[in-house]
């Protein structure tokens, strides 16, 4: 169902984020993200930068990471095609620091000092979080074909009401992690 009809209004800003995941021939996976911001009006005061015509990108940024099925990053590259200041793209080489890191729960917290906040770009940082999610979505089928290691907690476990320890979906997908009423009764069969 779409959102309810809005009050009369005019468009001022559009942020588009596109992410794509690719399976490579060498067994690795490329995840690419693109963030683009545009204004519906001519943006004249850009902190000393040139005037930006309506529809021209205020931000136009890309990130590509290459991962394996363990979510280890083998390569990372960031590009800034447009930003409000000429030096915006100077920060992109820092994203090479992602090489060797592993995408896991809370992985961005460990990167904040290297490529976040004052050491990075707000927009590239936002894009990086989206790319991590797409990496899991892209590799989902291939990872599900591998047996889960003892004690391994699936990445999506407890990230949504559908994957809580007491949910029917947890009972169905990961009965060993299920702690709902059927577990208390000593049953691990599917609810009727």
Image (tube, helix red, strand yellow):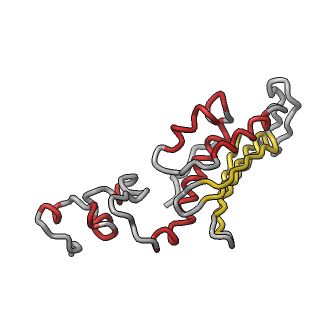
Regarding residue 10, the answer to whether it shows in the image is no
Judge from the rendering whether residue 165 lies leftward or rightward of residue 152; answer left or right. left
Report whether 58 appears left or right of 74: right
* Foreground residue among 161 and 112: 112
| Residue 46 placement (x, y as % from top left) | 80, 28
Can residue 35 be seen here? The reply is yes
Q: Residue at x 37, y 59 (%)?
A: 152
Q: Nearer the viewer, residue 1 or 20?
A: 20
Vertical placement of residue 99 versus 2, above or below: above
| Residue found at x 35% / y 55% | 161
Q: Give coordinates of residue 23: x percent, y percent.
A: 64, 69
x and y percent of residue 164 in the render?
31, 56
**Residue occupying image coordinates x 66% and y 42%:** 97
Q: Residue at x 71, y 38 (%)?
A: 94
Q: Is residue 82 left or right of residue 33?
A: right
Q: Position of residue 84 (x, y in %)?
A: 79, 33
Placement of 46 over or under 136, stated as above or below: above
Q: Which residue is at the front of the view, 47 or 105? A: 105
Q: Residue furthest right?
A: 50
| Residue 134, picture quadrant | bottom right
């Amino acid at each position: 169902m779409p959102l309810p009809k809005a009050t009369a209004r005019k468009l001022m800003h559009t942020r588009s984020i596109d992410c794509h995941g690719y399976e490579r021939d060498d067994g690795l996976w490329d995840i690419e993200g693109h963030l683009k911001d545009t204004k519906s009006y001519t943006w004249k005061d850009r902190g000393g930068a040139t005037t930006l015509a309506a529809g021209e990108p205020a931000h136009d940024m890309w990130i590509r990471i290459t991962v394996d099925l363990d979510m280890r990053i083998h390569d990372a590259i960031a590009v800034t095609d447009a930003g409000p200041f000429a030096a915006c793209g100077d920060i992109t080489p820092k994203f090479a620091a992602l090489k060797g890191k592993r995408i896991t729960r809370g992985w961005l917290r460990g990167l904040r000092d290297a490529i976040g906040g004052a050491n990075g770009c707000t927009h590239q940082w936002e894009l990086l979080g989206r790319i991590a999610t797409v990496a899991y979505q892209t590799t989902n089928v291939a990872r599900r074909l591998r047996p889960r290691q003892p004690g391994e907690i699936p990445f999506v476990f407890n990230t949504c009401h559908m994957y809580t320890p007491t949910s029917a979906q947890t009972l169905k997908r990961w009965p060993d992690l299920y702690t709902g009423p059927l577990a208390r009764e000593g049953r691990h069969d599917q609810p009727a």
